[in-house]
Structure formats: C-alpha cells, structure tokens
Image (cartoon, helix red, strand yellow):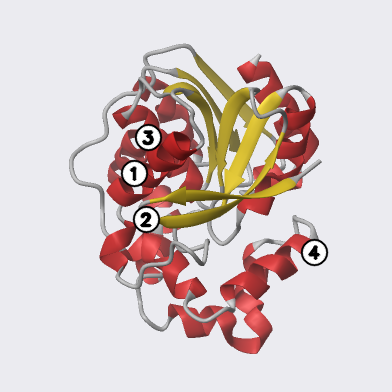
Amino acid sequence: MIEHVSIPTEAGTFDAIASGPEDGRPVLLLHGFPEAAIEWEHQVAVLGMNGFRAVAPDQRGYSPGVRPEQSSEYTVTHLVGDVIAMADALGWSTFDLVGHDWGGAVAWWTAIEHPDRVRTLSVFSTPHPGALKTALQTDEEQRMRSQYMLDWRERSTEKRMLDNNAHALKQMFEYRIRPSHVDEYIQRLSEPGALTAALNWYRAGKPHGAADKVSVKTMYVWSTEDVAFGSVAAFETEKWCTGPYRFEMVEDVSHWIPEEIPEAVSSLLLEHLG
C-alpha cells in the first residue's frame, strides 16, 4: 500500500511515502515537530485506496538530503518554497494540501501565498497565523502555551531533549500515539545534526510581513486537549478564511490528532476532499 519515493528539487532530494495511482488527484501532507512523514501513514494509505495520489514528505531538515546547517535556511519562505518545488517535481499544477503542527503552519502560508496552486486546505491543530497572533496579543493563556517556541531556540535544547534516552522527547507525545512511531522519531532525531535541523524551524525567526486571509476551501480541526493551541486562536481562525470554511472540534484528543485518531482524520479528509 505504501511506497517510498524520492522527490528531487534544487534544494536537495526529499524522502517521502506515497500511495495511490500516479494519475490520481494529488494530495500533499506535511508533518509536524518532532514527527516525520509516517505521521500520515494511515491517511496516505486510505487516500490511495480511494483513488487519490497521496504523498507525505519528510520536510526540510528531516530528509537527510535537504538538511542545511544554518538556521536562516529554515524560514517560512524556504519551507513554502519547498512545498511548491515538490509539487513542481511531482508534476502537480494544483493539489490538495494537508498539514499538522509546523506542517499546518507551512500549509496556511502556502495557501496564503499560492492560492492558485492549492485546491483545498486541511489543517490539524495549528490555527491560522493571523489568529494565533491575535491570541498571543489578547490571551495570557496562549502566551503561556507558546512559551516553548522561545525556549526551544536555546542551544541547550538538543541536549535536554536527548538526555536520559530522549526522555523529554518521548514525554512530548503524552503516551497518545503508537510506541513504534515514537521509537522511529527518536531514532531519526538522534542522528547527527537531525534534531538541530528540526529545531532550526523555531530558530529561523518570524515570517516577513503579516499573514493575509485564506481564500481556498478550508477545513480546520482543533482538539480540546491540545497543549500548544487554545480555544481563542482556534475560534479566531474562521475570521481569516474568506472561502468555504469548515471547523471541527474534537473532544478529549491531544495535540497529536492525526496519530491519536487516525480513522477519524482519514474520514474527515475524504469528506472535505470529496
């Protein structure tokens, strides 16, 4: 069901998993931190079985073939550029875009900057960047939730996360997802330079300019037990979407929505794309 493919771009070669017919409607799925493409294993397989061509890449820093050393090479501009470069390499003029966590942020910015390329947008956990900015300005709880984004810029973060058999990284998943996936994430991020590359997403600095509203058909899914993003940013997101908009709130689910409730996520995606 799942293929392992390579996507060559000018920045380097991205590793990816894929499923479905080559001529199927294209769907690109972007993972978050500290995960990898296999976060979307269930969804890629289900989409492929339903005739879509689903591809989930290990993104910049996670693919060994695209792992620059400088944090300045992990800006949102670079990350959005990677999405478009991968789509070009796959021969996709338009595509459905799905993202979670950091992958969700990249998905929002891609839809903002390239609405002509994105057919539909589906984002899990991460609110629209404009909504998050509003929440950070008005909601003390969201400021507390987001403090980690600043803390992880410290150069001691890698050691702290990997000490004691990567105990801190393992704790991050709240025992909500498959242990085999956690083990694979830890193994990948324990490779020389891999965790630094992943953390460079946080160290690269804020995007240049303010985020515009999104005009493409959008589904945003937020979970009530998300430790990173609160309800203020979640409910504010609708104000930043001018096209058809669907908001789904899932109860008693953590930040790790695609892996904690994979069947439900696959069903939501099929509904939205259908």
Earlier in the chain: of badge 2 and badge 1, it is 2
Quadrant including the N terminus: top right
- Tell me the CA gap for discs 4 and 2: 30 Å
Which residue type does callout 1 highlight?
Gly
SS type, badge 4 = helix
Q: Is residue 99 left or right of residue 241?
A: right
Q: Is residue 234 above or below residue 230?
A: above
Any mark on residue 180, and which? 4
SS type, badge 3 = helix
Which residue type does callout 4 highlight?
Ser
Which residue type does callout 3 highlight?
Thr
Any mark on residue 81, and which? 1
| Callout 3 crowding tier (Cα within 10 Å): few <14, some 14–19, many ≥20 | many
Residue at horizontal 42%, vertical 35%? 88
Q: Mark 2 points at which residue?
A: 11
Q: Is residue 200 above or below residue 99?
A: below
Q: Mark 3 points at which residue?
A: 110
Quadrant including the C terminus: top right
Earlier in the chain: of badge 4 and badge 2, it is 2
- Tell me the CA gap for discs 1 and 3: 8 Å
